[in-house]
Image (cartoon, rainbow, N blue to C red):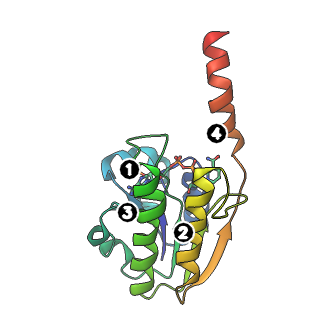
C-alpha cells in the first residue's frame, strides 16, 4: 500500500491517478475526506481516502496501517486552508516522517525542492532541507524529488495577475 500525503494537490492527484491506473493500492491522506473525494472523483473507489493532518501526529497512525511506501507531498502555503510553512513543511513533515518510521514503512519519497539547503535565501528551501535531514536520520530508504517551480504554479503566480489587470 502506498500512502500519498498531499494526494489531493496539483502534482500528486496525477501521481495518485497513475498509481491507481496501474492497479497499485493507493491511499490518500487529506484534512477533508469529502473534499478529497470530490477532487479525486474520477478515480472512484480505486483510491482510499483517510482523514489526517500532519500537524496532529496522533491522526497519522491510522493512515499508516499496512503502508510500505509514503509519498510526502504536503505544503503549508498557497491553496486551500494553508497551515503555514513552519507548521506544515517543517514540523508537519517531521511528524509524518517520524510516524512512518515508527510504523515500519520501508521507503519515503519526499517532495523537496531544487537547491534545498539550510542556508538558501528561500524559506521553502530551508524548510525542505530540514525535512530532508529528518528523513536521513531514519532507517527508511529514501527518495528525494527536488523540482524547480512547476509550470502550472508559475503560470498561476505570474500569469493570473497579468490576465486580471491586463
Ligand atoms: N508547486 C510547485 O511549483 C512546487 C515546486 C517544488 C516543490 N513542490 C513541492 O511538491 C509538493 C506538491 O506541490 P503542489 O503544488 O502539487 O501542492 P498543492 O497543490 O499546494 O497541494 C498541497 C497538498 O498538501 C496537503 N496538505 C496541506 N496541509 C496539510 C496538512 N496540515 N495535513 C495534511 N495534508 C496537508 C493538501 O491536502 P488537503 O487539502 O486535501 O488536506 C494538498 O494535497 C509539495 O511538497 C511542494 O512543496 C512544489
Residue 54 visible in image: yes
Residue drawn at point x = 66 percent, y = 58 percent: 113
Ligand 1 within 8 Å of the CB at mark 2: no
Q: Quadrant of residue 50?
A: bottom left
Disc 4 crowd rating (10 Å Cα; few below 14, some 14-19, many 20+) is few
Total labels drawn:
4
Cα distance in 3D space between marks 1 and 4? 23 Å
Q: Is residue 9 above or below residue 126?
A: above
Left or right, residue 137 beside residue 59: right
Ligand 1 within 8 Å of the CB at mark 4: yes
Left or right, residue 34 beside residue 160: left
Residue 86, position in %: x, y? 44, 56
Find disc 1 in the rendering and name its residue: 37
Residue drawn at point x = 38 percent, y = 76 percent: 64
Q: Nearer the viewer, mark 1 or mark 3?
A: 3
Residue 23 visible in image: no
Residue drawn at point x = 68 percent, y = 25 percent: 159
Q: Mark 2: which secondary structure?
A: helix
Circles 1, 4 touching at the beta carbon (< 8 Å): no
Left or right, residue 80 beside residue 22: left
Q: Earlier in the sequence, mark 1 or mark 4?
A: 1
Q: Earlier in the sequence, mark 1 or mark 3?
A: 1
Q: Which mark is residue 153?
A: 4
Cα distance in 3D space between marks 1 and 3? 19 Å
Residue 46, position in %: x, y? 46, 62
Foreground residue among 27 and 145: 145
Find disc 2 in the rendering and name its residue: 131
Amino acid at each position: 500500500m502506498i500512502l500519498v500525503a498531499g494526494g489531493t494537490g496539483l502534482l500528486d492527484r496525477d501521481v495518485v491517478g497513475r498509481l491507481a491506473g496501474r492497479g497499485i493500492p493507493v491511499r490518500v491522506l487529506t484534512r477533508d475526506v469529502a473534499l478529497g473525494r470530490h477532487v479525486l472523483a474520477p478515480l472512484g473507489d480505486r483510491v482510499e481516502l483517510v482523514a489526517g493532518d500532519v500537524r496532529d501526529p496522533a491522526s497519522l497512525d491510522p493512515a499508516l496501517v499496512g503502508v510500505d511506501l509514503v509519498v510526502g507531498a504536503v505544503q503549508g502555503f498557497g491553496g486551500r486552508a494553508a497551515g503555514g510553512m513552519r507548521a506544515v513543511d517543517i514540523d508537519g513533515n517531521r511528524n509524518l516522517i517520524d510516524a512512518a518510521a515508527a510504523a515500519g514503512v520501508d521507503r519515503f519519497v519526499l517532495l523537496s525542492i531544487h537547491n534545498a539547503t539550510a542556508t538558501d535565501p528561500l524559506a521553502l528551501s530551508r524548510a525542505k532541507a530540514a525535512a530532508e535531514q529528518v528523513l536521513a536520520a531514519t532507517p527508511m530508504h529514501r527518495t528525494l524529488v527536488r523540482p524547480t517551480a512547476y509550470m502550472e504554479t508559475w503560470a498561476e503566480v505570474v500569469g493570473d495577475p497579468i490576465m486580471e489587470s491586463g
